[in-house]
């Protein structure tokens, strides 16, 4: 049921046009254009400090006022359906950001509570269904200090899914867990976010190739986006997929050039 729900979510394309980010005298990027294609994963890699997280913040900042578009410096963030992006974005960070005094279930329900919405039986039932979907049904009543790192990220993924937004921004969400747990979380995210418009920032080339439809490398100062790599097939791709292996060398060459 949860996979069907994700698959039938209304997809929306998001365009960032002329995006600019400046801190003091340093310009991270200027006049940057990027389109997040509807219902697909866009992955972004590049050196630390290049501006990947700042690009996510630029998109999030555009949701803080009402209206169709919001100027960000000299840039605009807009949806292809003409409706505001506000209220249609979910965000998952590198840290799980679980509140330590709440149970897993209550953390999943947190957004609803903060908006003053009723925590009724349907809401609790949906939260429990998502918790089960990420394999956490036996831990729904536990607090974060009783969970492993992988379990905490599963809970954070369930919370992101509960928000039921068509656009999902993910900033290195699986970087703090071991390799096997990371692959399992990637599989879960690819399945449960099918049909959503996803921007994933990552330092892991294999993760990008397993999950991304289009993969960009951010490089330079001010930073620019190179031509995208297009991974074949649909995520999650097996780690030994021939298409993944064929693109891995090219992606690593682009990353090496970005670091030089």
Image: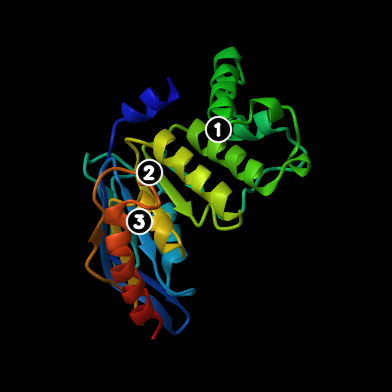
Q: CA distance from mark 1 to mark 2?
A: 16 Å
**Residue 209: image tag:** 3
Disc 2: CA contacts within 10 A as few (<14), some (14-19) or many (>=20): some
The residue that disc 1 covers is 134
Disc 1: CA contacts within 10 A as few (<14), some (14-19) or many (>=20): many
Q: Residue 81: x percent and y percent? A: 22, 39
Residue 255 or 166: which is nearer the viewer? Answer: 255
In the picture, the quarter occupied by the N terminus is: top left
Q: Residue 133: x percent and y percent? A: 53, 28
**Residue 236: image tag:** 2
Locate residue 171 relative to residue 230 in the image: left or right: right
Q: In the picture shown, does residue 173 fall above or below 12?
A: below
Q: In the picture shown, does residue 23 fall above or below 136?
A: below
**Residue 70: image tag:** none
Label 1's element? loop
Tally the numbered discs: 3
Q: Residue furthest top?
A: 121
């Amino acid at each position: 049921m949860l996979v069907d729900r994700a698959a039938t979510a209304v997809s929306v394309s998001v365009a960032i046009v002329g995006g600019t980010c400046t801190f003091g005298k340093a310009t991270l990027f200027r006049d940057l254009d990027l389109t997040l294609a509807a219902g697909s994963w866009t992955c972004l890699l590049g050196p630390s400090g290049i501006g990947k997280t700042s690009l996510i913040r630029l998109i999030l900042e555009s949701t803080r006022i009402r209206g169709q578009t919001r100027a960000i410096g000299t840039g605009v963030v807009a949806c292809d359906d003409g409706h505001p992006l506000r209220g249609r974005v979910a965000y998952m960070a590198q840290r799980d950001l679980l509140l330590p005094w709440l149970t897993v279930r209550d953390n999943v329900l947190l957004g609803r509570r903060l908006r003053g919405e009723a925590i009724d039986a349907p809401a609790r039932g949906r939260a429990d269904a998502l918790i089960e979907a990420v394999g956490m049904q036996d831990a729904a009543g536990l607090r974060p200090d009783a969970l492993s790192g992988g379990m905490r990220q599963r809970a954070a993924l369930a919370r992101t899914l509960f928000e039921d937004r068509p656009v999902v921004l993910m900033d290195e969400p699986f970087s703090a867990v071991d390799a096997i747990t990371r692959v399992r979380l990637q599989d879960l995210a690819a399945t449960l976010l099918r049909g959503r418009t996803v921007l994933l920032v990552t330092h892991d080339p294999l993760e990008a190739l397993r999950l991304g439809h289009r993969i960009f490398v951010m490089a330079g100062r001010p930073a620019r986006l190179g031509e995208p790599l297009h991974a074949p097939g649909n995520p999650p791709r097996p780690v030994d997929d021939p298409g993944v292996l064929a693109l891995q060398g090219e992606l690593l060459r682009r990353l090496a050039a970005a670091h030089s």
